[in-house]
Amino acid sequence: MPVQFISHGYDTTALNPYNEDAWAIAHSDSPIGPSRYGVSGAGSWKVSIVANADRTVSIAQGRGWGCGVIDETDGNETLQFPPSASGVRWDTVAVRRDWTPTAGVSKFVIIPGGSMRAVSGSRVTGPGQIDEQPIALVAIKENQTQPDDVVDLRCWSSNSGVYAKDDLARQYINQLGSRITIGDTEWQLVLGDNDTPTWVILGGVFRGPSPLILTSEYRNIGTHLNEPIKDGSVSRSGMRVSAEGGVANKVPIQYLANTAYVIAKFDKAYAPKVASEPFPQTIVDLYQCQMWVTPAGEIRVSFKVPVPEQPVGEMVFSLGGLGWNL
């Protein structure tokens, strides 16, 4: 049974006037000005899989807006998807707003998709006529009774900021000038070469520092005599990660030529998706050294030539200035 939508922003009727309460909500909890679409709270219209039900999701009650219309639902609604004929099909769950009837109608709908993990290409965008606000992407897998995955496409907007959880939200928040934070990264849609709309990274949320976990042969050490010991760590700003601190051997140590050694590990949230390009070569106690980081969250080193056994504290690896992209 579809839930009831309480909507404000369509043509008014005697039973549904656009009163001062609706006006206040439109400029506070559900601010229709800062962004084209949005939801009001963390739980509003969240889509989740229904256990023990065939290809069914539940949409939580809540409030959201799109194209000047504010909608509020008074309960959860369930939607059932048709089976996939082959492989995986990615359908879009959306709020459809229809201005064509008197007073307008809002409702939850399933927009059939394809094999690509993307907002459905058949989505309708027509403010004042029919417009569809994506809130989730649902994967329906062949011969599987439960949805395979749910991608949260909702966005939140208030006080001149827009936030989303998944990068796919940029597929529908795509008007020139759009500025949105997704995860830890802030994006803006600008005109690039030949006036082509292009997303650029402005910066991002700073996270860290997250301490390094040194392997048993190493300890933290300052990189200059007049500095206190600074524990090695990694920090993140948007899609960029940087390391700091210094590491030295705490036991006598030797290295084979052209062999990778792990000197420290770090939280995988700061690791690149693929092994980083080797950092510029450095000299460690007169030996040419190469350093890089891995998707497993490791800092590795190797040497061009064999390094004979070195005493404690002789091999100092400076991490300051090392950085990589996620």
Image: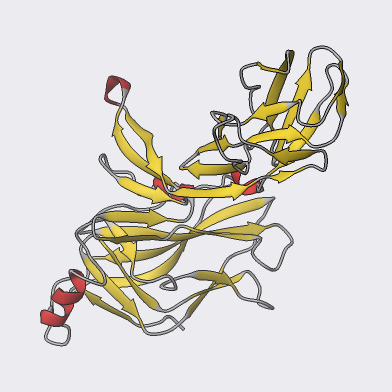
* Above-or-below relation of 208 to 44: above
* Above-or-below relation of 277 to 218: above
Residue pictured at 46% horizontal, 42% vertical: 237
Q: Is residue 182 left or right of residue 188?
A: right
Quarter occupied by residue 179: top left
State the residue in front, 215 or 126. 215
- Measured as percent of width and height from the top left, residue 219 is found at 73, 40
Q: Is residue 112 left or right of residue 294?
A: left
Q: Is residue 19 visible?
A: no
Residue pictured at 16% horizontal, 87% vertical: 15
Residue pictured at 57% horizontal, 44% vertical: 116
- Measured as percent of width and height from the top left, residue 20 is found at 10, 80
Residue pictured at 29% horizontal, 33% vertical: 190
Q: How is the image coloured?
A: secondary structure
- Measured as percent of width and height from the top left, residue 36 is found at 26, 56
State the residue in front, 271 or 198. 271
- Measured as percent of width and height from the top left, residue 288 is found at 73, 13
Q: Is residue 75 visible?
A: yes
Q: Residue furthest front?
A: 226
Quarter occupied by residue 283: top right
**The C terminus - image quarter:** top right
* Above-or-below relation of 207 to 195: below
How many numbered marks, from 0 up? 0
State the residue in front, 82 or 309. 309
State the residue in front, 151 or 212. 212
